[in-house]
Amino acid sequence: MSPVTLQINLAPTDFPHARLILPHQLRQLGPSVQEVLLVMDLHRSKGARFAGAWEERKPKMERLLADLSAADPRIRVVEVDYSPATTRALSERFFGGTRLPMKDSRGGPYHSYFFGLAAAAHRHVLHLDADMLIGGGSRTWMAEAEAQLAAREELVSCSPLAGPPRADGTVAGDTRWYEPDGRVPGGFRYRRFSTRVFFVDREAFVRRVGPLRAKLAPPIHVLRALRAGNPPYREPENLVTRIMVSRGLWRLDFQGSGPGLWTLHPQYRSPTFYERLPDVIARVESGDMPEAQRGHENVQDCLVDWSDVRAARKRWYRRG
């Protein structure tokens, strides 16, 4: 197996969950990688979603990263470089020299994804967003993923199974976007790319999907972006998805042999979520998942009661 970089994107606003989830990610995946690259994005977007409590959380995040890197020599912390020279280099490498936006229309990460890929010491990279939970703990999944990418030119990336596995081998979701993979038992081929978690051979990724081209968001999102002071561009995963569809390419999700590897995504933030998070992490690491959670990539009410979030969203929509 080739050496692998585990690359995780972080920003100050992530601290309340990262303080627990980042050590969890390192416990689950650290034994399988040769480098851990923690990419800190200090370019602050507009709006609460990606910039909430930035100044308050920034020193706390910096202390967390310093403590983790001091305990493990494989951990490297780098700040996203937005300088013109670096932007030009990333644009040439991934976008054929065309525009590389700093952020998407929501204020979400854009430039930082490509910076993290390029900054990795190894060509095989497992990327995670800062909120992804990891189950299974397989020590062989990355070697299995590397073999799949090497043998199949139609694969852009591999990802762990989305959600804890079901006994019948099915997963929840819109079947227009995925189908069972005929070559990997329990695997699924997806037409959609996701920046939440992906394993790539960086050189094969560039060859198979490049060069990318930034696209404007739909008109209503462009207007919202301009009002908020954010760039008017669609998110990177949409660009890769469009190319996958047009070129007949796929993302492969699979659990793998033995305990395998699977992911879980907490889609909201709430007081209940932060209160429940230590228990959720413990249950993910032990594999103690309720049946109602199995097959779902997003955290369901059986693990975290999201009723407070739904009530707040209803109030917001009524005001809107």
Image (cartoon, rainbow, N blue to C red):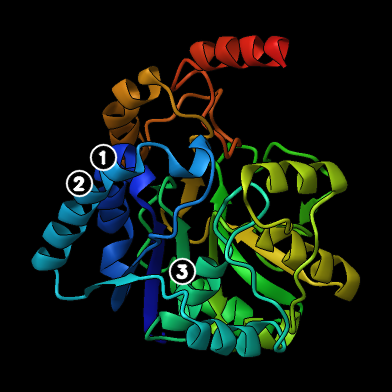
Taking the spot 33% from the left edge, 32% from the top edge, the residue there is: 283
Taking the spot 79% from the left edge, 53% from the top edge, the residue there is: 217
Please identify the quadrant where the C terminus is shown: top right
> Which residue, given by chain and number where applicable, does mark 1 sit on?
56
Measured Cα–Cα span from mark 1 to mark 2 = 8 Å
Where does the image place residue 97, in percent across and percent down from the top left? 70, 88
Where does the image place residue 211, in percent across and percent down from the top left? 74, 84
Q: What's the amino acid at mark 3? A: Leu
Q: Residue furthest right?
A: 246
Task: Tell me the crowding category of disc 1: few under 14, some 14 to 19, or many 20 or more residues within 10 angstroms, Cα based.
Answer: few
Measured Cα–Cα span from mark 3 to mark 2 = 25 Å
Asked if residue 268 is positioned above or below residue 193 in the image, the reply reads: above
Please identify the quadrant where the N terminus is shown: bottom left
Where does the image place residue 5, in percent across and percent down from the top left? 38, 76
**Label located before the other in sequence (3 or 2):** 2
Viewed as shown, does residue 126 lie left or right of 98? left
> Which residue, given by chain and number where applicable, does mark 2 sit on?
60
> Which residue, given by chain and number where applicable, does mark 3 sit on?
126
Determine whether label 3 and label 1 are within 8 Å by CB. Answer: no
**Label located before the other in sequence (3 or 1):** 1
Residue 264: tell me if it is visible: no
Taking the spot 69% from the left edge, 42% from the top edge, the residue there is: 227
Residue 93: quadrant of the picture: bottom right
Task: Tell me the crowding category of disc 3: few under 14, some 14 to 19, or many 20 or more residues within 10 angstroms, Cα based.
Answer: many
